Amino acid sequence: MKLPRRRFLHLTAGAAALTALPGKARAQQYPARPNTMIVPFAAVGPTDTLARILATHMKERLGQSVIIENITGAEGSIGVGRVARATPDGYTLSIGHWGTHVVSGAILTLPYHVLEDFEPIAVLAAGPQLVVGKKALPAKDMRELVGWLKANPDRVLAAIAGSGSHIAWAFIQNLTGTRAQFVPYRGAAPALQDIVAGHVDVMCTQALSALPLVRDGKIKAYAVTSKTRLSIASDIPTAEEAGIAGLEIS
């Protein structure tokens, strides 16, 4: 690339001046030390899994470790808030999703601003959710599940793991005319454990975390919240196929 002579001289002078600066004044190459990535949900859940895969590749590319810290609670806002208060030097990273970085800003009173207090780096993944239930539920498909929900409005327990899960089940209730008691959890993994144990009845959660339990026969999957079926789970119908038109969440 050819530079105008005046611009070239300015750059050259700047470079010459930089070499004369004391060592401490010279800019360090990033990253000069390990990064910390805050996961606002419990370990083993979908966000945590993605963070650990990403951290492995970042270490290979950057030559520095990425330390994962699971800071849970308040639908992810405690962990995200930790990042908002951190020194803005690029060494404290936030990983989240539409629940933690969009929905929370609309439904919660937060000590930070989801748009103004963060610098977006990359979109990592997109995935639909599964509508799942405990194995003992009598409903065999989504239509039967809606019927069971309507017949038991005061005893249904819906596990909630973050604001995304919360909004998803509220969306289902609005579309089906049903209601449930919400039971909050610090992440998808402990919530799914209670689905398996039968302590709670239903949940809407990311397919990544729920599908292995569905395949093992430990929980039931009623629908996937995408326009088309998952290629790795083509036997699970879309919400529209299952009888709930308009339920699309990713």
Image (cartoon, rainbow, N blue to C red):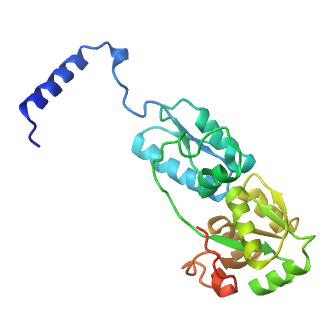
Residue at 57% across / 77% down in the picture?
232
Pinpoint residue 60: horizontal percent, then vertical percent: 43, 46
Q: Is residue 30 left or right of residue 119?
A: left
Pinpoint residue 183: horizontal percent, then vertical percent: 83, 59
Nearer-the-camera pick, 135 or 223: 223
Whether residue 80 is visible, yes or no, is yes
Q: Answer above or below: position of 202 versus 163.
A: below
Write down the quadrant of residue 19 in the picture.
top left
Q: Which of the image's four quarters has the N terminus? A: top left
Nearer-the-camera pick, 208 or 238: 238
Q: Which of the image's four quarters has the C terminus? A: bottom right
Q: Is residue 100 left or right of residue 196?
A: left
Residue at 65% across / 76% down in the picture?
247
Q: Is residue 96 left or right of residue 194?
A: left
Whether residue 236 is visible, yes or no, is no
Residue at 76% across / 78% down in the picture?
176
Q: Answer above or below: position of 211 versus 236.
A: above
Pinpoint residue 168: horizontal percent, then vertical percent: 69, 66
